[in-house]
Amino acid sequence: MAALAASAAAAPPAPVGIGIEGVHKSFGAVHALVDINIGVRAGEFLALIGPSGCGKTTLLKSIAGLIPIDSGRITVGERVVTGPGPECSVVFQDFALMPWATVQHNVEFGLLLRGVPAKERAETARRAIAKVGLGGSFEYAYPSQLSGGMQQRVGLARALAVNPQVLLMDEPFASIDEQTRRVFQDDLLRLWSAERKTVVLVTHSMEEAIYLSDRVVVLSPRPGRVHQVLDVPLPRPRESGDVRATADFARMVDGLWQVLRKLQ
Amino acid sequence: MISPDLGGTPPARLPREAFVALAVLAALWETLARLSPALGIPAFAVPSLVRIGEALTKITPLDVAVTLARVLGALAASFALGVAGAVVMYLSQTADRYAKPIVRLLMAVPVVSWILFAILWFRWVEFRIGFVLVVVCAPVFLIDILDAMKGVSRELREMVRSFRPTRVQFFVKLMLPATLPAILTSWKINLSLAIRVVTIAELVGAVTGIGHQLAVAQELFSVANVFAWTLVLVVLLFALEAAVNWLEHRLLRWRT
């Protein structure tokens, strides 16, 4: 995994920004999102955090085009989102791996649907698998033969294989143990430093939000509104030093906690 | 594309206990056959294993082949109809709401009623048998496959949608492999169902097939022949189930 950047053969596409303007979304009588306005800069790492049920995942899936919004506008680059687009890849909380397919075939999946020839598909998938640190003996394993952390790496490799400009991550570390999570977070930061994709991360973890992101958007309890946007001015690269042990990190996590505590 | 060490366990074989149980059953039967005159039971009612064996040597392969062809042909047609119906009902909630009561109604009609309807409605014997088999088996396929499709996890469906599949890709690349375990289970259920239904259908209308031979044996009071043809039916069902099990082992090795 240390050679994340070095193994990238295909040039990463230029990142694009995301515009979220006046977005409303209801499920029947339940208002999930109300007047959401967020601008995500190209190449930015943005975290969405808030109490359970505040609409974080709904907003992420709306950006992905998987959930239609009731009103407002979401743009990814120049494209107004009306459905899933080629710029975005999603990493799902419970991995969403196909249990009947090997790691290699899972990672190839997006390319297969795009009609990429078999040889090119296999090569690209192998590179993506290597990028996330699973190369070698795991290509032909089935998801059930992997640990949770490994399965999520496969999910990330699948998202990366299609070379997206935007990576949308829905609590990707929620089902992973603490040690694996920290290693994975560092790996993700290295990957992001190398490829500079625009990343939107939904998380419940304050430490994770501060450690990974440039800005943290705090959503209020249902109906979800943008309560506050916090800048994270911690220096980068964070993965090579022990940022978590610094006083600034602790102060920022505490600051985020003070904001979230008032929302409980 | 699977490394050798990842292969699954082989399909289950008949355990020793099953052989022992069958041998005990055969021994009990033979004892009953020998004691039947002393017990006041007519000798023809409980034929000895030798007589059943003799009847087995007179089995006509053509009748077995005809019944097998009817079962497999009707099941193939039922499967095609079941899949088509399930896809339409999955895609359209309106179709689902209107069609489901009809499908449930069809499933509630007794097989004997379908046979009587077939005799009253159709003249051609093969069509009668095919009709009865399809009308009994297709709804089972439909409901099983539809339930399996609806059971595919939301995350998997969203994952596939995020890559913008065509409708054909959605069904071929996701729904087909995701529902394959349910499809194979449905085939096993329908094989058993079809073997039983075809026998009854052949009893009342056909001039060939195992059901017809059973009717002939009954007219001749030949219990040995009834036993022999019944054994053939049971072995036929086991063989077909073994074929599906083999297929299941090949296609679903990821589950082991």
Image (cartoon, rainbow, N blue to C red):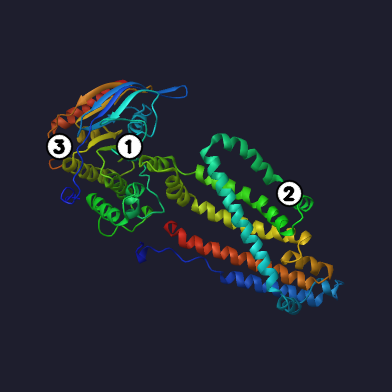
Determine the secondary structure under disc 3: helix
State if disc 3 and disc 2 touch (CB < 8 Å).
no
Q: CA distance from mark 3 to mark 1?
A: 35 Å
Residue in the image at 51% along x and 39% along y? B91
Say whether residue B33 is left or right of residue B4. right
Residue in the image at 66% along x and 74% along y? B23
Label 1 is found on which chain of the structure?
A
Give the amino acid at mark 2: Pro
Q: Position of residue A253 (x, y in %)?
A: 21, 29
- Give the mark, 3 or 1, whose residue is nearer the N terminus: 1
Foreground: A138 or A250? A138
Q: Which residue is mark 1?
A: A85
Q: Nearer the viewer, mark 2 or mark 1?
A: 1
Label 3 is found on which chain of the structure?
A
Q: Quick one: label 1, few (<14), some, or many (20+) residues within 10 Å?
A: many
Q: Position of residue A26 (x, y in %)?
A: 42, 24
Q: CA distance from mark 2 to mark 3?
A: 73 Å
Is any atom of residue A17 visible in this view?
yes
Say if B199 sits above or below A49 in the image: below
Give the amino acid at mark 3: Val
Q: CA distance from mark 2 to mark 1?
A: 51 Å
Q: Which residue is mark 2?
A: B110
Name which quarter of the figure residue A62 lies in: top left
Give the amino acid at mark 1: Gly
Say whether residue B71 is left or right of residue A242. right
Is any atom of residue A49 visible in this view?
no
Foreground: B200 or A258? B200
Q: Which residue is mark 3?
A: A243
Determine the secondary structure under disc 1: loop
Q: Position of residue B161 (x, y in %)?
A: 39, 40
